[in-house]
Image (cartoon, rainbow, N blue to C red):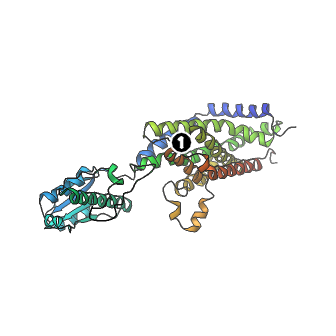
Amino acid sequence: MTLIDPVRLGAIARKEWIQIRRDRRSLYLAFGLPILLLIFFGYAINWDIEDLPLAVLDRDNTSESRALVDAFTASGLFTVVDRPAREAAVERGLVSGEVRAALVIPPGFARDVATRDARVQLLLDGADANTATVALGYADAIVARYGARVSAAGTAAPAFSRDDATAASASAPSIPIDARARVWYNPTLESKNMIVPALIAVIMSVIAALLTALTIAREWERGTMEQLAASPVSRVEVVLGKLLPYLVIGLVDVAAAVAAGILVFGAPLRGDVFLLGVLTILFLAGALGFGIFISAAVKSQVLATQVGLISTYLPALLLSGFLFDIASMPLALQGVTLLVPARYFVTVTRGIFLKGVGLEALWPQALMMIAFATLGLALAVRAFKKEIPA
């Protein structure tokens, strides 16, 4: 008897597909949940700042100080919501949360601008450290661009937008070094361009494991394992036969998620779609194999769902590089991330979407996903037993 017979393999795959069609919950989970999660998280997770409430305490009240305030408001990043007369009012606004930042312009600002020795103060609400850090970077860029325009033209009416961030660090002509930054791959610094591709990897790692976590456990709970055990199919054929329909579903889900990312969120897709498809197959094979391993090991649909969710969602969300930079983690935790398959697929999706790179840059991730796919399928075959316990 051959290890894999195409007829028997097709029969198992057809049986599993019929079971999926009969179970509407599986269909909703398979086709509806990925797109729902992508849209939900795609809009919910946003590190950009827009219309940040700003208080302005202008003690100079000159054309130069008003031009600086106009530079902040023209950027679209800050919105003046309060003009307090005293510093105590500024503090109250920050404490209450009515404003997230405060611009304090001291007396004599116009005079100091003329002598190239002007100073302003920006107060930020650091309770949200991420927003404060981003806002500080943009505020520095706005002020730097304002100073450069004043030094170059002797006038102060510069506008600043998010697209100017790459040039905002340009120095005044009196400084001998003219440093200009250029952001590659995501020049507008929009967080959605980074979040959406990685979301596809995170969501599919969870969905793939959850889908197949029910397959073998369902056979045990419904009493159909006896029929499967009495059939001449091998363990490899059972595992692969149950995996193939979900692999097709996973590819359809990824294709739909990619289309939604492009059409709904405007994420750029600069790389090879075919390469993305091939690497997606490698990733899904490992994730689906791991799900079948869980299903065969625990033999309970409820427990398999819980184990599959815990073992995939948290690692994919926290340790894949999706939310947190792996390089900034402690060395011990960086080692743990090597065991998270989603880490490699996040690199793949971002590389193909944003950078347009090919296999020459992604071959390490491809090799690791091949290793995880081999391991996942091997564990699934080893855990699945056709013998019926006495």
Q: Is residue 326 above or below residue 196?
A: below
Q: In the rendered image, which quarter contains the N terminus?
A: top right
Residue 109 visible: yes
Percent position of residue 338, x then y: 62, 59
Pick the front one: 144 or 10: 144
Q: What is the x, y in percent for residue 67?
A: 18, 55
Query: Which residue is at 44% across, 46% downward?
Result: 193
How many labels sit on residues? Answer: 1
Return the residue at label 1: 271
- Picture layout, residue 374 above or below residue 224: below
**Tag 1's secondary structure?**
loop
Instruction: Tell me residue 333's x, y (percent).
Output: 57, 65
116 vs 266, left or right, is left
Of 265 and 15, the residue lying toward us: 265
**Residue displayed at 57% across by 54% down:** 343
Give percent across and percent down for residue 358. Answer: 58, 45
- Compared across the picture, whether 252 is left or right of 324 comes to right
Q: Which one is nearer the viewer's eye here, 174 or 95?
A: 174
Specify the amino acid type for callout 1.
Gly
Please name whichever residue, 224 or 284, is drawn nearer the observer in this view of the structure: 284
Q: Who's the residue at 57% across and 63% down the image? A: 334
Identity of the residue furthest to the right in this view: 1
**Would you identify the image quadrant in which residue 26 lies?**
top right
What is the crowding at mark 1: few (fewer than 14 residues within 10 Å), some, or many (at least 20)?
Answer: some
Which residue sits at x=51%, y=44%? 353
Taking the image as shown, residue 167 lies to the left or right of residue 55, namely: right
Is residue 29 something that shows in the picture?
no
